[in-house]
Image: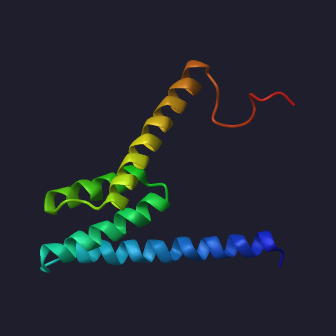
Amino acid sequence: MTQKEANFAESTQLIRNDQEKIGTLNLLISTSTQPSNNLFNYYQERAEILFYLNKYEDALSDINAMEKINEIPSSIKLIKWKSLIQIQCAKVSQEIKQSLAIQDDLSHIPR
């Protein structure tokens, strides 16, 4: 197995683990009868995972829920701002592609 194949297998396993964690956190959040600080921690962990999976809007949704419970730590504020920037960059990129009538592939690049 090449290093690239090993890295791919490892990345795939990490994504599966993250998705399992998200599923567990979804259940904990939706059925929580715990104190609000536990709920806050569940949202925080899920927001961090979603951010690293490039699911910025979902991460922002969790951060908004956290803000309703308590003040968010600086690490989460950073994730919030980075998510907002990523969402805006994606919108600008999409607008540029549409205005230039470019498909979202590499066919427009000369060889």
In the rendered image, is residue 5 in sight? yes
At a point 24% along the width and 53% down the height, the residue shown is 64
Which residue lies most toward the right here?
111
Q: Nearer the viewer, residue 28 or 87?
A: 87
At a point 27% along the width and 76% down the height, the residue shown is 27
Q: Is the residue 27 above or below the residue 101 in the image?
A: below
Counting from the top left corner in percent of width and height, residue 21 is at 40, 76
Q: Is the residue 102 above or below the residue 83 in the image?
A: above
Q: Which color mode does the image show?
A: rainbow
In the rendered image, is residue 58 in sight? no
Q: Quadrant of residue 93?
A: top right
Q: Quadrant of the N terminus?
A: bottom right
Q: Quadrant of residue 34?
A: bottom left
At a point 78% along the width and 69% down the height, the residue shown is 4
Q: Nearer the viewer, residue 66 or 92?
A: 66
Counting from the top left corner in percent of width and height, residue 6 is at 74, 76
Q: Nearer the viewer, residue 78 or 44?
A: 78
Q: Quadrant of the C terminus?
A: top right
Which residue lies most toward the front here?
74
Counting from the top left corner in percent of width and height, residue 36 is at 14, 73
Circle count = 0
At a point 71% along the width and 72% down the height, the residue shown is 7
